Every structure is written in C-alpha cells, then in structure tokens.
Amino acid sequence: DTTFFDKDWKPCKRIFAEYYRIIQAKGENFLVSDYYINNYLQMTAVCSLANKDTIIKNGECIFYNKQGLMTSQGLYSNNKEIGTWIFVDYTNNGKKYSSGFLKDGLVDSILTVYDQSGNIRATSTFKNDTLNGLKTIFREDGSISSISNYLRGKQNRWYSE
C-alpha cells in the first residue's frame, strides 16, 4: 500500500505528490520508507504507527537528499532525535560540503568542511554547537594554512605557517 504526500507532507492524490511512502512490518515495528517522487529515498525509519499517515519514529533513521545521498543518520525515540547523529551536507553538484556528528541536535564533534574537489579545507572542534578547541584551515595542496584555538566560542590563540 502506497501513500502519496504533497510538498507539505499532507496526503494527496498521486498527480499532486512530491513524496510517497511504503510501510513494511518489521517485527513489532514497521520500516517506513519515504521516497521523493523521482523514486530516490528521502528517509528510512524504524517506526510505530499511530495510523498510516502518522508515524512515530522509534529507532534508526536515515535521511537522504534528492540525489539519493545520505544526509543524516541516527536514532529517534518517540519522534525525538536522541544520541549521536552523523550528518553530511552537500554542494549543489552533489559533492560533500561538511560532515560531523550531532548530539541531541547540537554539533558535538570535529566538523569537517570540504572544497569542490572533495579535499578537506577546514576542521573545527565543536562542543554543544559552540567552537571549543582547534580550528585548522588547509591550503589547496593539503598543507596547513593556520590553526586557531577556541574556548567556548572565542578565539584565544592563533598560529600561522
């Protein structure tokens, strides 16, 4: 059974759909697979169901962009993100732009930023969504351009090569 949704995730007829959903039983839960209308995955999630149009995410969840590339992965409990999440942002041409980890919805890791060729251009240490630690900028050839140290969002040391 397939359910179609418009751009606002309201159930609709197929002709107006931006997304569609397929639900499969998985033990005591359900595997919900949402797709963009172009047939690329938009999300997979382990869920319980309130009804066929209302899902409650309770387990692993993976989100994808319109090109089918994973953008985030983590756990839900009662429709709330929990624990550590992996996230990846992409440029318009599908190249990786940044990646890191979220904890309780906040950046809590080393955030890595990439250039158009996929090379690492910068790394920054975050704690609770705030710069807290080293930030390193790289040149195109991969050598270090500068290193800064941050404490609770404020730069307290800077080094350059």
Image: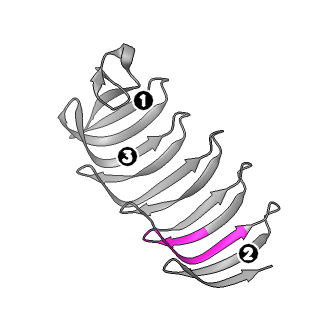
- Looking at the rendered structure, the secondary structure element under dot 2 is strand
- Looking at the rendered structure, the secondary structure element under dot 3 is strand
Q: Which mark is residue 70?
A: none
- Counting from the top left corner in percent of width and height, residue 21 is at 34, 28
How many angstroms separate mark 1 from mark 3 (CA)?
14 Å
- Looking at the rendered structure, the secondary structure element under dot 1 is strand
Q: Residues within 10 Å of mark 3 (few under 14, many from 20)?
A: many
Identity of the residue drawn at 55% across and 49% down: 89
Please report whichever mark, 3 or 2, sits nearer to the chain's N-terminal start: 3
- Counting from the top left corner in percent of width and height, residue 24 is at 29, 30
Residue topped by disc 3: 61
Q: Is there CB contact under 8 Å for labels 1 and 3?
A: no
- Counting from the top left corner in percent of width and height, residue 91 is at 62, 45
Please report whichever mark, 1 or 3, sits nearer to the chain's N-terminal start: 1
Q: Residues within 10 Å of mark 2 (few under 14, many from 20)?
A: some
**On the picture, is 130 further left or further right than 148?**
left
Q: Amino acid at mark 2?
A: Ser
Please report whichever mark, 1 or 2, sits nearer to the chain's N-terminal start: 1
Q: Quadrant of residue 154?
A: bottom right
Q: Quadrant of residue 26?
A: top left
Magenta residue check for 86: no
Q: Amino acid at mark 3?
A: Cys
Task: Name the outermost residue toward the bottom.
Answer: 156
Q: Is residue 27 above or below residue 109?
A: above
Q: Nearer the viewer, residue 55 or 131?
A: 131
Q: Which mark is residue 146?
A: 2
Give the foreground label among 1 and 3: 1
Q: Is residue 152 above or below residue 83?
A: below
Q: Quadrant of the N terminus?
A: top left
Residue topped by disc 1: 35
Q: Which residues are magenta?
A: 124-137
